[in-house]
Amino acid sequence: MKKLKIVTIGGGSSYTPELMEGFIKRYKELPITEIWLVDIEEGKEKLQIVGDMAKRMWEASGYPCEVHLTLDRREALKDADFVTTQFRVGLLDARIKDERIPLSHGILGQETNGAGGIFKAFRTIPVILDIIKDIKELCPNAWLINFTNPSGMITEAAIKYGGFEKTVGLCNVPIRYMMMASEALDIPVEDLNFKFAGLNHFHWHRVWDKAGKERTNEIIEAVYNPNSTKEFKGMENIKDIKMLYEQIKDLALLPCSYHRYYYVSDDMLKNELEEFKKGETRAEVVKKLEAQLFELYKDINLDHKPEQLSKRGGAYYSDAACEVINSIYNDKKTEMVVSTRNNGTISDLPYDSIVEVSSIITSKGPEPLNWGKFDSAPRALLQHMKGMEETVIEAAYTGNYNKALHAFTINPLIPSGQIAKDLLDEMLIAHKNHLPQFKEKIEELENQ
């Protein structure tokens, strides 16, 4: 088998041990000889800590893989076979601003939704496009596997604006929902069939058993019926506020955790405002968790992923990131949920839209499974959100302030009018060091 070189941009992330564990588990199928962990100057200390731990993990595995640490992205990318991205522009301090500034206005603040999600895209899209320029030059045959949030919008920017078709977007959320279905039905996950469709952090799904009987409604009853005696563990990073049973029953589809921000917005905002007042927004909690994790990673005897990493919110990351690489490399035709071109899969969206859907992963990339049409209620939200995403991406690419304001105005979690403009202006100034495309407008705002 061909020897493999994998490059991880954002290699100093606390998620890296999860990724290493996934590659080690699959080594007999993925004979990786080189892993390059890349970061920036501000992440140098974390890169060294987590990089040393990654080396210990591989040494303990007994497999002959060299782990390289570098701040030179171009050095790392030369002749790579796969490039994974898991970086955060502005680090966690930027996420804290994304959450706290909207909440200071009484508006929901969240990492990938609302104003926070829009600004994460604004900061990240220019960087992913710059990375793609290097990939095209130094490893044009590589696959780009993107886990950087907001994953769907970053993947769309990479494919449509970066012109790099060999990009696949990933998320760990669908895996958690497969496990929840298994728990609800008391059927092993491998004995169930799933179909997901929608956008990243905005998908719905249906479930069947091996006999071909649909079991979606039974899961709705188990999870959402107030009389259900079953309990389910939600996502670590989202408050487990119950969605309305009557609404989900009418939907006849299983929503994802992030639909809470749209289906029970007031309850989610009330909870976030309480956390905001206590200095306990999710970003602030994560910053403390990360500090604890890196203290663990410093232990020279630690050579395996610690259990505490599961509280970080990225559980099952390795199963998504490593298995999609495995399936492409070995043409395994594994069924996975990824962000990829629609290609008519969801008939309610344009053919070239980037959607998050169940797909067969082959050596030539994802082959999305047909979903067809949504009923009117989910279709209305889906089309609205896709239009919002497209507007955000265009604003991020062009640096067009008016387009950015329009994106704020049509986002369902941001009030329109002057409050949207004031929030946009405040966040532009707060993030000015990471928004070169808006430089002139930010200078104008600062001089007013």
Image (spheres, grey):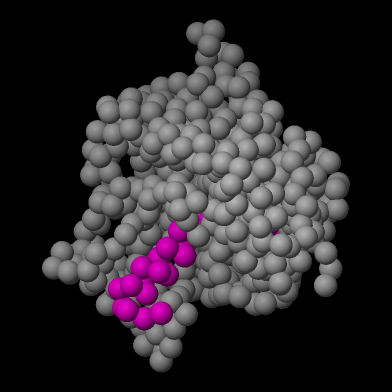
Which quadrant would the N terminus be assigned to in this image? bottom right
Q: Is residue 223 above or below residue 444?
A: below
Where is residue 275 shown, x and y percent of the image?
29, 34
Chain part drawn in magenta: 159-188
Where is residue 380 shown, x and y percent of the image?
38, 57
Q: Residue at x 44, y 83 (%)?
A: 191
Q: Is residue 342 left or right of residue 222?
A: right
Q: Which residue occupies the extreme left position in the image?
A: 227
Where is residue 343 shown, x and y percent of the image?
61, 67
Q: Is residue 76 left or right of residue 316?
A: right
Q: Which residue occupies the extreme front position in the image?
A: 301
Q: Residue at x 17, y 69 (%)?
A: 229
Q: Does the segment drawn in magenta span residue 182?
A: yes
Where is residue 388 shown, x and y percent of the image?
48, 45
Q: Nearer the viewer, residue 384 or 64?
A: 64
Q: Quadrant of residue 434?
A: top right
Q: Nearer the viewer, residue 385 or 143?
A: 143
